[in-house]
Amino acid sequence: MTVKLKDKEFVPFISAESIDQRLKILGAQISKDFKNDNPILLGVLNGSFMFLSDLAKYIDIPSEFTFVKLSSYSGENSTGKVKSLIGLDSDLKGRKVIVVEDIVDSGLSMSHLLEILQTKEPLDISIVSLLFKPEALKFPVEIDYVGFEIANKFVVGYGLDYDGLGRNLPSIYQLK
Ligand code: IMP
Ligand code: MG
């Protein structure tokens, strides 16, 4: 079934079941890789709210969860401008940090975020992104855990929005 958000139509792309299956695997990998590290998972709002809350249920090791915001995006394309980081209330010094993103598109937001996070002197930083568009990457970032590699097409749902709408869709839709 297609979904209409404002002027655009979207078609089903990744089902809730596929997402759940993938998260189970990602959660198990992260739990294994960070077994004795008490990592801090840092969700990037708003897009990662649903992803991190579901992923967290599959992480079965001592771990902490917090959210930050780095807002830079409106409409369909990256603006090329990134604002500052807000909401970081945890001390990252000496910690293993896992950044949790909804999607890495051009990589601008992520590379900017990494720059800021490095100044907090974490032990190391890993990245988990639900979606990754390899063809869109302009700012090289290495993603440690990718949910799904997708084509360079606009998607919504499961936290991702089009002009503020569509975040509540339980699965992912692609622009028709
Ligand atoms: P980047 O800086 O170009 O990598 O863009 C990163 C941010 O843009 C993501 O965290 C999303 O919030 C947003 N974004 C990029 N591609 C899409 C998309 O296809 N749908 C919805 N939001 C997107
Ligand atoms: Mg985002």
Image (cartoon, rainbow, N blue to C red):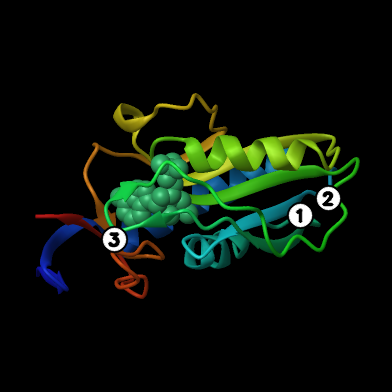
- Residue 103 visible in the snapshot: no
Q: CA distance from mark 3 to mark 1?
A: 31 Å
Discs 2, 1 touching: Cβ within 8 Å: yes
Whole-percent x, y for residue 11 in the image: 13, 60
Q: For the point 30% across and 65% down, which residue is it?
A: 171
Please name the residue that numbered disc 1 is placed on: 61
Please name the residue that numbered disc 2 is placed on: 38
Disc 2, SS: loop
Label located before the other in sequence (3 or 1): 1
Please name the residue that numbered disc 3 is placed on: 156
- The quarter of the displayed image where residue 64 is located: bottom right
Position of residue 69 relative to residue 131, above or below, is: below
> Is residue 117 found left or right of 137 in the rendered image?
right
Whole-percent x, y for residue 122 in the image: 83, 39
- Say which quadrant the N terminus sits in: bottom left
From the viewer's side, name the closer residue of 19 and 137.
137
- Disc 1: CA contacts within 10 A as few (<14), some (14-19) or many (>=20): some
- Disc 3: CA contacts within 10 A as few (<14), some (14-19) or many (>=20): many
Q: Is the residue marked 2 within 8 Å of ligand 2, measured from its CB?
A: no
Disc 3, SS: strand
From the viewer's side, name the closer residue of 116 and 173.
116
Q: Is the residue marked 3 within 8 Å of ligand 1, measured from its CB?
A: yes
Position of residue 111 relative to residue 42, above or below, is: above
Position of residue 111 relative to residue 87, above or below, is: above
Residue type (three-letter) at the residue carrying disc 3: Val
